[in-house]
Image (spheres, grey):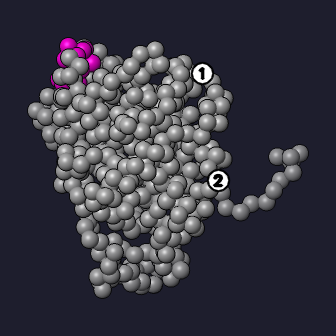
Amino acid sequence: MADTNKTAKLSFDGKELELPILSPSAGPDVLDIRKLYAQGDVFTYDPGFTSTAACDSTITFIDGDLGELLHRGYPIDQLAEKSHFLEVCYLLLYGELPSAVQLEDFESRVTNHTMLHEQMVYFYRGFRRDAHPMAIMTGVVGAMSAFYHDSTDITDPWQREVATIRLIAKMPTIAAWAYKFSIGQPFVYPRNDLDYASNFLRMCFSVPAEEYEVNPILSRAMDRIFTLHADHEQNASTSTVRLASSSGANPFACIAAGIACLWGPAHGGANQACLEMLREIGTVDRIPEYIARAKDKEDPFRLMGFGHRVYKNFDPRAKVMKQSADEVLDLLGIENNPTLQVAKELERIAIEDPYFKEKKLYPNVDFYSGIILDAMGFPTSMFTPIFALARTVGWISQWKEMIADPQMKIGRPRQLYVGPTARDYVDVENR
């Protein structure tokens, strides 16, 4: 972030303030209002913080108008096509693509720390048998600080590094065990001879009674899902992690806070909501009815999986995800599935219908990821845990960046108070 030597003048109540204008390496200029309250005795009002930069960052850049997503400057489509998840993890965490030696070392450290503390098995068994996997993940990740005392001191760079590797390595095991617990199957321990995505699939779908071979196409699709969800700038869950981190909370507590925020249907639950919508529509002949409802401003129904709050053109992740969806569905031979037929017809309409073009309601990453995960055999309750697994590296990268920032302050948003002014207490018998 650089000072442009430009300023903006703000005049009110006989006062005139000069606000510095800061220039990022990409994106619009930013008004620096840090001294606005001290000098002008006023706050800004920005519900949802949609026009407010709460931090500066070097990790991820999004241009919603152009449909551009960059991690450390690298386009997401190139990373999804040419790279793989753990290499993207290294990029997000350390700022540059690794050398062959660095990548081998990083992958080895992650692979050799995938097991959970054995006493955590009892922690899982404390949940009800029908507990939602996200509830389990929130609790288990938050409880990691009770099992790994040697990596909770955020002032120690080595402990921060240990916590980083532990979270990335153990999250697939935590998510897979949450799934196994929810369906009453025995836990499957990780194996060091498998890659990250294959290990996760095996822990989810293998059983002790028979051997399980991971299909490379499914593994690649899973890896792409992880890659495409690794980070997405200052979204709600990432901002939650940063806000929790600003208090000095340990990393496990901060990531648990991010998982809890991600659980919301307007955030990480969007792909689940999309698939549920496709199932509600049911058959292709009912699509016109739902299209009409989507166009009716008086009808609360909205098509899930179309459009994006940030991307005003197209979601750059969707093209890659569509390719994976086609590969997975072709492999599994389920083209005649009614839900898939509804999805394909909706996709065609969104591309050709003038209404959708005008509103720029193109299929987004959630539309395709839900279809892939359903085809793989995951229940909708596991969609958001898989999102949380992938997004963990983004949360940690943002957490590490914030901890190292000399400008870091505890988060303290202001408010526009519209409640009663001061009044005297009245004894209960006189009310």
For the residues bearing labels 1 and 2, Cβ distance under 8 angstroms: no
In the rendered view, would you say 332 is above or below 50? above
> Is 424 covered by the magenta stretch?
no
Task: Give whichever of 130, 227 is nearer the camera.
Answer: 227
> Is 340 covered by the magenta stretch?
yes
In the rendered view, would you say 32 is above or below 299? below
Magenta-drawn segment: 334-346
Residue 411: horizontal and vertical position, in percent? 54, 64
Task: Give whichever of 190, 146 is nearer the camera.
Answer: 190
Please tell me whether mark 2 sits on a helix, a strand or a loop. Answer: helix
Please tell me whether mark 1 sits on a helix, a strand or a loop. Answer: loop
Residue where numbered disc 2 is placed:
149
Q: Residue at x 42, y 85 (%)?
A: 16
Residue 179: horizontal and vertical position, in percent? 49, 27
Residue 47, quarter of picture? bottom left
Task: Nearest to the eye among marks 1 and 2: give it.
Answer: 2
Q: Residue at x 49, y 59 (%)?
A: 161
In the figure, is residue 132 to the left or right of 235? right
Residue 160: horizontal and vertical position, in percent? 52, 60
Q: Amino acid at mark 1?
A: Arg
10 Å neighbourhood of mark 2: few (<14), some, or many (≥20)?
few
Q: Amino acid at mark 2?
A: His
Q: Which mark is residue 129?
A: 1
Q: Magenta segment, principal secondary structure?
A: helix
Residue 132 visible, this angle: yes
In the rendered view, would you say 101 is above or below 193? below
Q: Residue at x 39, y 19 (%)?
A: 211
Of the numbered discs 1 and 2, the one sitting upstream in the chain is 1
Task: Give whichever of 56, 347 is nearer the camera.
Answer: 56
